[in-house]
Amino acid sequence: MSETSSKKIRAIIVDDEELARQVLREFVTKHPEIEIAAECANGFEAVKSVTELQPDLVFLDVQMPKLDGFEVLELIGTGAAVVFVTAHDNYAIRAFEVHAVDYLLKPFGVDRFEAALKRAKERLGGKPFSSGQSVQDARSAPAPSPSELAAAARPPAEYIDRIPVREGTRVFIIPVAKLDYAEAQDDYVAICSEGKKHLKQQTISSLEAALDPSRFLRIHRSYVVNLERVVRIEPYGKDSHVAVLQNGTQLPVSRAGYARLREFLDK
Amino acid sequence: MHPILGNLRRLIPYLLAWIPLEGMLVYLLAVPGGLTWTEAFVVGFPLCVLYAFMCLAAFYSCRGTPLDRTSKLKIALTHSLAAVIVSGFWILAAKALAHVLSGFSAFSGLEPRLTKNFPLLFGTGILLYLLVVAFFYVLLAVQESQDSREREMKAGVLARDAELKALKAQVNPHFLFNSLNSISALTSSDPAKAREMCILLGDFLRRTLGLGEKAAIPLEEELSLIRSFLAVEKVRFGARIQMEENIDKEALDVFVPPLLLQPLVENAVVHGISNLVEGGCIKLDIHARDGVLSIAVENSFDPDSPPRRRGGVGLANVRQRLATRHGNLASFQVKTEGDRYFVAITMPAEREART
């Protein structure tokens, strides 16, 4: 990579409609300091490209095949400045809650686009720099992870019905019905489903908050369990318990977790 | 207005109903009253006809004292007093009649013999009057229930109209915003295509404008609306959208509520095709048989597509509009099989526009 190209702001355009990408491409091309690193037509491609190319700026549609814009953002981390581009004004609050730089409503003119770009540049530190640095800088900032933000932005009493997880550049969608349990591991949660574990950068508390409490229960500081999977509760040691799942897995149950479990079973 | 006096179709049955009462009166005058049958008939007939008309006055006292809103004492007093007065006048009329008849040789000596029967006549008059009072109360009750049923029906119709107005199908604004964005893209890359899309969009909008005012349009009109909708969407989605139609010619002139099918097709695009990377096909099957119009929309969709919050509003609206308009005569079903999504509607095949 030459010195000049590494100084450029690297952007990715994500939209399932060719014509919508074309508008962005046209507006971006007027700026020699910006380089279009990739164009993606669906959520999976977007996650793959962003993970591989580590862009500075992502123009992100909301409604797309495979993954919607918010799910994409949840999986790509906080490295890039994200500008949502959509015809729907009802996602605006949610977009800013996940720290989007701007929210462009289709159709938009060149002035509005320039304003968004200005804000994006401000977010990126006002000066073009290489993508690796920008990701590094943003990651070291004490910002909550996108999953946390996504959880906070979810409307009340609406629970998720699927959990997108990423392994490298591959995306897996885990329907919550197939989630056996989730285990906290430092800054990550291990999503355990059908005998496999997927790591996701999220706290177990925010995952717990996103799941329907009538189906999933926090049985331990580090464990949330799918109640349908619990076969029995066995005493373990002096005054603690373990939950035995259908597949034989044993999960520790804390005293508070046991109380919650009893409360649920007595209902 | 008097319900019987003002209506010949009611007056005649009313007078006919008095015939048995007349017979009774003649019998009373002849047998216990001691008049000859001829005398009893000549006196009884005109008196009875006269009294039939006099008793019609009971309507006003009945209307003035509705059963449910008047004390029982007041009802009893009002009608007893009216009965005494009306019957009293009747006796006076009987007296006058007897006086006139006495002038004829055939009826000499009638007057004193009839006068002897006045208490009997008076009592009969009171009873007959009260009978008519009862009749009027029944009549008023029947009328009242008819009125309230009519009011209920009117209220029902009004409520339905209001509901239909509220449910008036509207063009999804996001469709417009996205189309305008496509035009914005085409203006620089392909101005001719941009112009074409403006015309397609204008065509679609013109067709939808004013449709809300109409209660029903021929299916053919709705179909051309759908085609112009899809023409616009094809510019946006390109080869991702395909359409397959299988439509009975018989069905083309059946009347349907406007924008009934368009939301189904739009739903197929927004929740089906637009979530598929490769796109898919929308199949439209419409048949009219034995007075029933059946419509089936089938499309492919991604069972693992991201959740969309606005989902199903358009379908719920169609379902409600059908139910409001046709009640049990219409059905609306949604089902999924693997990656296929089906919406099926049946409804009465109306060949004429109704308001």
Image: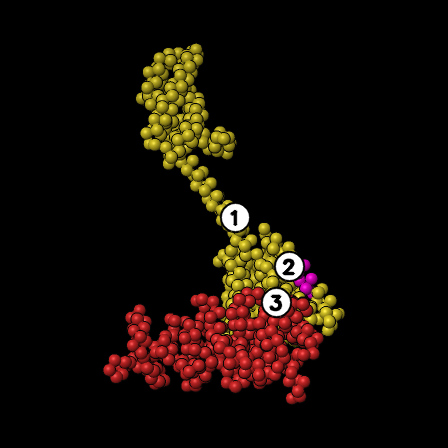
Q: Residue A263, percent across and down?
A: 30, 71
View extreme (left): residue: A238
Helix, strand or loop for the magenta stretch, by majority: helix
Q: Is residue B246 left or right of residue A232?
A: right
Report the chain holding disc 1: B
- Closer to us: A192 or B160: A192
- Closer to us: B170 or B77: B170
Instruction: Report the Cα–Cα distance between label 3 and label 2.
Output: 24 Å
- Can residue A18 be seen in this snapshot? yes
Report the chain holding disc 2: B
Q: Residue at x 71, y 64 (%)?
A: B199
Judged from the image, the secondary structure of the residue bearing numbered disc 3 is strand
Instruction: Report the Cα–Cα distance between label 2 and label 1.
Output: 25 Å
Q: Residue at x 43, y 75 (%)?
A: A207
Say what amino acid the circle numbered 3 marks. Answer: Leu
Judged from the image, the secondary structure of the residue bearing numbered disc 2 is helix
Q: In the rendered picture, chain B carries what hue?
A: yellow
Write the start and end of the magenta stretch as one range: B200-208
Q: Is residue A125 above or below residue B104?
A: below
Q: Residue B172, percent across and down?
A: 59, 63
Which residue in the structure is indicated by mark 2?
B208
Q: Is residue B310 above or below residue B301?
A: above
Neighbor class of circle 1 (other Cα within 10 Å; few <14, some 14-19, many 20+) is few
Report the chain holding disc 3: A
Instruction: Report the Cα–Cα distance between label 3 and label 1.
Output: 40 Å
